[in-house]
Image (cartoon, rainbow, N blue to C red):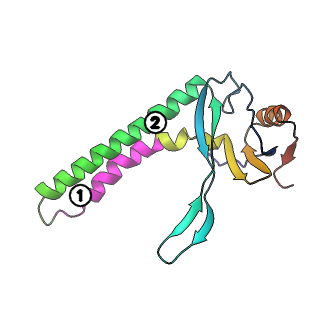
Amino acid sequence: MAIRPFPKKVRVPRKTVVFPSTCPHCLRPASERIPIESKGVLTGWYLFYTKWKYSVIRVPFCRRFARRFWISHRIWNIALIATLILAVAVGFLGSSHDRGSGLLLFILIMGPASIPVWLNRPDRHIRLLAADAASIQFAVQEPAYAEALAAQNGTTVAEWYD
């Protein structure tokens, strides 16, 4: 499966963002809201740490996609907790020659548990690019959704390289 670039970019004036009542994944009616997060913007660098700023907005998706999204995240959380418990148990009960088994256990459990999270991530369909004082920018995979998002917010759809 090749990674497709986002064909459309929508710049919405910074006010209340109105999303279409359709899902950006399948264009069916949307009823559930899923948070999407921007990539971090470096806001400061200090001697011992860096400071990043993230923007988060909740986008409506269809019930089917939202269910898959939340189930995949629950599976990942359960796998992480199980891996940590098993790694601690192996560390206490295992022999001193068995140092790599905790890492192998992590890879064997978390690897498969990460696949559904990666496949059901909302930023494959709509991505929050940037938010500043004047506007919020979205990258949208589906051109029809981009047109509806722009129309509801009184703006136009820009090509990716504007």
Q: Residues within 10 Å of mark 2 (few under 14, many from 20)?
A: many
Q: Residues within 10 Å of mark 1 (few under 14, many from 20)?
A: some
Q: Is residue 102 magenta?
A: yes
Label 2 is placed on what type of residue? Ser
Q: Which mark is residue 101?
A: 1
On the image, numbered disc 2 is attached to which residue?
A: 72
The quadrant of the image that shows the N terminus is: top right
Position of 69 relative to 53 (above/below): above
Q: Which residues are magenta?
A: 98-115
Q: Is residue 78 magenta?
A: no
State the image coordinates of residue 27 (x, y, percent, origin top left). Answer: 71, 27
Label 1 is placed on what type of residue? Ser
State the residue at coordinates (52%, 44%): 118
154 or 69: nearer the viewer: 154
45 or 107: nearer the viewer: 45
Q: Quadrant of residue 132?
A: bottom right
